[in-house]
Amino acid sequence: MNDCLFCKIIAGEIPSLKVYEDDHVFAFMDIAPLTKGHTLLIPKTHCKDLFEMPEDVARNLYAAAPKVANAIKAAFNPTGMNTINNNGAAAGQTVFHYHLHFVPRYDETDGLV
Ligand code: 5GP
Ligand code: ZN
């Protein structure tokens, strides 16, 4: 059995707020947002991190990235956006199904440095 949290989100076994979905990827709101609109983009194919990601999975994921960024932009009207990806516990990864963070930025008002 697959005990992966994000595989369960893709399967709908754990609820999430969907931002974008196609045949290859799923994007949903982070449960503990760093800023308003913080979103995670994940491949539907389980892979642990960037080191293990097959090229076709990477291609499909990055093909979706501008669509996710623009969906967030349309919904939240940020003035900028960070995309961040942590690989390995030493790098701060806590969920071991690859995910790309989209963190919308709002000039001085978002509290992040
Ligand atoms: P990491 O630290 O691995 O780069 O990021 C994991 C992210 O997953 C964190 O930002 C955390 O808030 C988010 N997260 C953890 N559990 C859940 C969950 O059950 N639902 C959602 N939507 N996000 C989660
Ligand atoms: Zn998974």
Image (cartoon, rainbow, N blue to C red):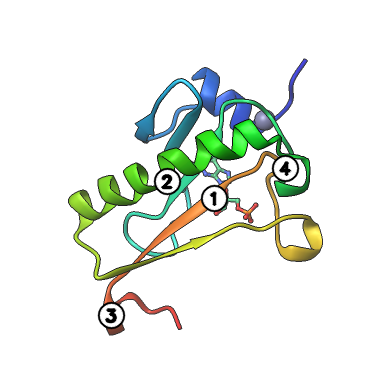
Q: Are marks 3 and 2 in contact (CB under 8 Å)?
A: no
Q: Nearer the viewer, residue 112 or 57?
A: 57
Q: CA distance from mark 1 to mark 3?
A: 22 Å
Q: Are marks 1 and 2 in contact (CB under 8 Å)?
A: yes
The disc label shown at residue 39, or none: none
Residue at mark 4 = 96
Secondary structure beneath dot 1 equals strand
Residue at mark 1 = 100
Query: Of label 3 and label 4, which has the lower sequence position?
Result: 4
Residue at mark 2 = 65
Residue in the image at 71% along x and 39% along y: 53
Residue in the image at 24% along x and 55% along y: 73
User: Disc 3 residue type?
Assistant: Asp
Indicate the position of residue 29 as horizontal and vertical percent values. 40, 44
Q: Are marks 4 and 1 in contact (CB under 8 Å)?
A: no
Query: Of label 3 and label 2, which has the lower sequence position?
Result: 2
User: Disc 1 residue type?
Assistant: Leu
Name the image quarter holding residue 7.
top right
User: Disc 2 residue type?
Assistant: Ala
Q: CA distance from mark 3 to mark 4?
A: 31 Å
Name above or below for residue 87 compared with residue 60. below
Q: Which mark lies nearer to you, 4 or 2?
A: 2
Name the image quarter holding residue 99.
top right
Q: Are marks 4 and 2 in contact (CB under 8 Å)?
A: no
Residue in the image at 26% along x and 45% along y: 71
Q: Is the distance from the Cβ of mark 4 to the nearest ligand 1 atom less than 8 Å?
A: yes
The disc label shown at residue 107, or none: 3
